Amino acid sequence: MLNSKHRCNHILLFLFITNSHFSHADGSTIDKIYHSYVELLEWEAEWRMVQENKNPITEQKRRQLHKFGLGKAVSETVFIEAYIIAEKHPEDKLSIEAYELEVLWQLSEQGEFIVDYGLLLELEKNRGSNTWEYATSLLLEKEYGRISATANLSLIYEWGDIINNEWETSIALQTRYRHSPRFEPAFELYAGEGNLALGPVITGMERLGKMRAMRWQLGSIFGLNNDTADYTLRAVLEYEF
């Protein structure tokens, strides 16, 4: 039997190989970067928004994607969250497009190995068609004093009646300076599905009392190739209780 350290090395090698060739699709990989930690007995209400100035492949202008989620830590190492995904274009109203279920599994204690690691499992169903997406992401984190480095390495499979069944890969990296709980500046890099983007992000947390907190993120991610929007705004609000 393989121990936890060997399993981590094998998963990391597999995802490194699959992420060495990025697929090309019309979607964007820019989103929230996940950390591998689970807080015990935590409920979370989340709102997430991503807005592109213009998608260079679909030619859609100022497309907004909103996620509304409710999650719960069901054990010391497992967190489950369900989302409603809505989309808005300048000429249209906000409309529900998909549903998603996520499971975050913390696989190591903080500081137990050279890097902390976990898995994120995601299943998404399109509301208007028989279209599905499943993703497995390896979450890696390492602290160097006040600096935290995070990597999300994702393997994705899409299938359904109106799309080609295909595998995709993506990688998201974040370097964050932990100045204080209320102010943590960061830089993020996204690659995958033809996208390549880099930009600054600010994150923070405000304690609201016993077992309650508000976490927030705000960033502007700039495209580095012709297949990525010139800039993408992203925001996150998480209320923990």
Image: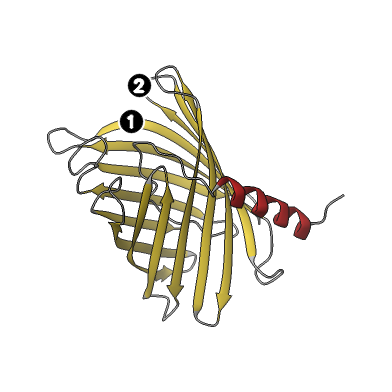
**107, 194: nearer the viewer:** 194
Q: Is residue 107 visible?
A: yes
Name the residue at 64% across, 65% down. Answer: 116
> Is disc 2 in contact with disc 1, using a CB cutoff of under 8 Å?
yes
Q: Amino acid at mark 2?
A: Gly
Residue topped by disc 1 = 97
**x, y percentage for residue 136?**
57, 43
Q: Position of residue 228 (x, y in %)?
A: 30, 48
Q: Is residue 114 left or right of residue 52?
A: right
Does residue 188 sit above or below 176 in this rendering? above
- Which circle's residue, 2 or 1, is located before the other in the chain? 1
Q: Amino acid at mark 1?
A: Glu
User: How many numbered tags mark residues here?
Assistant: 2
Q: Is residue 37 visible?
A: no
Disc 2/disc 1 C-alpha distance (Å):
7 Å
* Picture quadrant where residue 88 is located: top left
Near mark 2 (Cα within 10 A), the count class, few <14, some 14-19 or many ≥20, is few
Residue for point 44% across, 72% down: 176
- Residue that protrudes farthest toward the top in the picture: 161
Percent of width and height locating residue 91: 12, 34
Frontmost residue, 99 versus 41: 99
Crowdedness near tag 1: few (<14), some (14–19) or many (≥20) residues, C-alpha within 10 Å: some
- Residue labelled with disc 2: 128
